[in-house]
Image (spheres, rainbow, N blue to C red):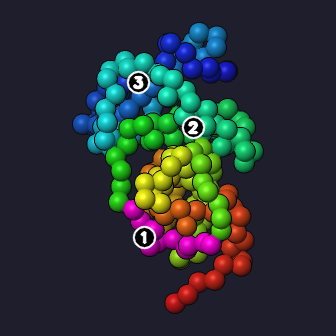
Amino acid sequence: MKFTPGNEWSWGFSDERAGVRALILHICDDAGMRYIFTTHYTTADLREFPQPQQAFCIEDAALLTDFQEGLYAINIVQDEICLPLALNALACARFVKLPRPCGRLFLPFAGNMVPHRGQVVSLYSKDGGVGDFMVLDDEPDSDVYRVMLLNQEWDLAHIVLKSGAMIRVPGSCLCAYRSISLQRTARYA
């Protein structure tokens, strides 16, 4: 199946189940088959609510392209993996509430990397873990970037982040995807 954004694509909300409604995207493949993509986000997660049947716009298409290209750059090219990650990144970037910055949990790096929207980066925690994230912003907010977790989950200092979780971190904590060997990182007491 191949999916190309078009006029048939629109935002919406799922039917309420157990008091929860999820943000969804009505999509159509190139053969004209209609599908509903359910994002990781419920209405409680949103800072902005799309109107029911709000059309998929040019901004959405541009963001989706950036997120897919970032995944292609690290050799994630299978559509069944790439498209759901990119669609969740799109929903996260457009509609999800902003969490507080949380740079104190991560090792800072002195690299000269300037992250860009769609780039896949890694964060190394002070307790020795590593997580992979999609950069959601082209420009930081006071050197703080929004990033979305790509891994299934990450146990971060007794907080378990699930795929699609947004965090905000200083640019100094972001590293190119898996650029640091865990054997070479130092942990301090």
Kindly indicate the quadrant of the structure image that contains residue 79: top right
Question: For mark 3, what is the residue?
Answer: 11
* C-alpha separation, residue under disc 3 versus residue under disc 1: 34 Å
For discs 2 and 1, the disc positioned in front in the rendered view: 2
* C-alpha separation, residue under disc 2 versus residue under disc 3: 15 Å
Q: Is 106 within the magenta?
A: yes
Q: Earlier in the sequence, mark 2 or mark 1?
A: 2
Q: Nearer the viewer, residue 117 or 52?
A: 117
The picture places residue 133, in percent across and down from the top left corner, at 57, 53
* C-alpha separation, residue under disc 2 versus residue under disc 1: 27 Å
For discs 3 and 1, the disc positioned in front in the rendered view: 3
Disc sitting over residue 5 in the figure: none
| Residue found at x 64% / y 14% | 30
- Among all residues in the image, which is located at the extreme left? 19
The three-letter code of the residue at mark 3 reads Trp
| Residue found at x 53% / y 76% | 126
- Residue 123 seen from this side: yes
User: In the visual, does 138 lie left or right of 101?
Assistant: right
| Residue found at x 47% / y 60% | 143
Question: For mark 2, what is the residue?
Answer: 86
The three-letter code of the residue at mark 2 reads Ala
Question: For mark 1, what is the residue?
Answer: 158
Q: Which residues are magenta?
A: 101-110
Q: Which secondary structure, mark 3? A: strand
The picture places residue 54, in percent across and down from the top left corner, at 38, 20
